[in-house]
Amino acid sequence: MIGSGWSAEKRQKSDELLRRHSYRHLLVKHQRPFYDMVHESKEKHFGLYSSRKIGKSFMLFIIALEFAQRNPGTICRIILPNKTQAREIYSDIYQQLRSALPIDLTPKYLKMEGAFQFTNGSRVILGGSQPDNCESLRGPLTHLLLRDEICSWDASNYEYVNMSILIPQGTTVPDFKIIDASTPPRTPTHPWIMIDYKKLLMRDCLITLNIYDNSLLTPQMVDNIIDTYGGVDDSNFCREHLCQLIPDGSLRLVPEFNDTHVGADLPLSDNFGNFETFQSIVSIDMGLVDNTFITYGYHDHIRDLYVILGEWADTRKSYGEIKIANDECKVKYISGTSFLAPIEICDVWEHARHSMNVDHNWQTQPPSKGRTEETIAYLRDCFKNNRIMIHPRCVGLINELKTAIWNDQRTEIKRDSKQLHADGVMSLAYGAKAVIFGRRPDDIVGLVFRKLSIRRKK
């Protein structure tokens, strides 16, 4: 019970802070940075991605209690995968906190309703996102939405419950905020990881806490957990306690890829410091309704490496818009005296390729495709033999290489209904297949086009 062993002086100081609507002191060391981010940032969406036993639900409840006391007559919703789970977790936290809260600031728990009622008219309402009960979440307003264990929400129902039920409740609330918290998902293709996780990372609104950040655990407790998993290299330990986005290894598209394949620019000169010219390659996995992903790289014939320097990705763009972006990226990543004019490989329908050529003066060559599993097998072989190096700024490509998986039947790439996955992996694979490893640039161009022409005839 929090507060049960406090001295009279400590309790008095705590009560003073609570009456000023400051609950931060109830959190432990590793929990406070997340509290600070939520309160200090002007953003409207925040995320906590953590290992087990960090106390994330406790953190959410503290934020909810403070918000309810600070803002009379407001509604805060805490949603978990199911309502029973929500009631069990938060009623237990409520009991732990009661001894730390002054009587007049302690909300009344309405067990039948699954809600906490405050004397100032505010309410904290518990709910579940499961498909068979999500309609009960509908309500007139929500001022603060807390989505707990969101990576365990039903993936097939994710978009509907959020975009059709929960988020519309805050559209007329000026300061409406969403706060997410979750432990790692079973597969990194969960919608939250695919969509919200990336956005929160880009906006610097995500805090990740792993087992080594947990101030509630002693070193001995951490060692015991590691022993249970058989070591720190166990994939389950890496996922559950280090928060790494690691799918089942048997389903990964490119399990050979690892952090050793990520590095900054390699020197553009030979072993004697002489100036060299390299063959650049632009590889495009084209999509208009779905994602277009482009990788920009070159063949370093000195080290016989395919080096990726940059990427571009977007959705629902016209050929003209994509060409403009592509021209800008070519200047940014592969222009200058160090690179020959790029070979441009593009996976697109032939009538579309003709349109790109005629309407936009954009000439590309088709990739060497074959069956998808054969293309992925070639890419895997490249990583196995350390023939590819990727610049760390290519965060989208690196993320896909770590997380893209086959479907359960291993018959095709698993794709999300809203946002296609592994377009970057396919773009990289097409580029890799266009590289003539072991050749200097003055030999490459002719060989590439002859190679592509022969494959196309086949």
Image (spheres, helix red, strand yellow):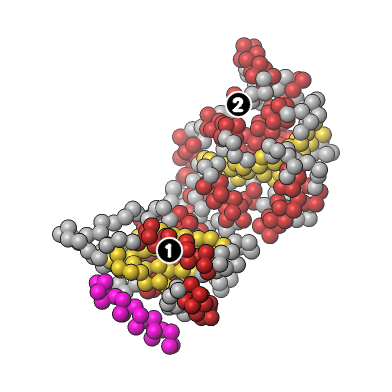
* Secondary element at tag 2: helix
**Residue 432 at least partly seen:** no
Under mark 2, the amino acid is Arg
Left or right: 147, with 53 as reference point? right
Of badges 2 and 1, the one in the foreground is 1
Q: Nearer the viewer, residue 35 or 358?
A: 358
> Which residue carries the number 1 mark?
327
* Secondary element at tag 1: helix
Image point (53%, 29%), residue name = 29
Under mark 1, the amino acid is Asp
Left or right: 153, with 423 as reference point? right
In the image, is residue 388 part of the stretch drawn in magenta? no
In this picture, which residue range is highlighted in magenta? 438-458
What label sits on residue 24 in the rendered view?
A: 2
Magenta-colored segment: predominant secondary structure: helix
Left or right: 9, with 341 as reference point? right
Image point (48%, 72%), residue name = 360
In the image, is residue 441 part of the stretch drawn in magenta? yes
Image point (53%, 60%), residue name = 314
Q: Quadrant of the N terminus?
A: top right
Label 2 crowding class (10 Å Cα cut-off): few <14, some 14-19, many 20+? some
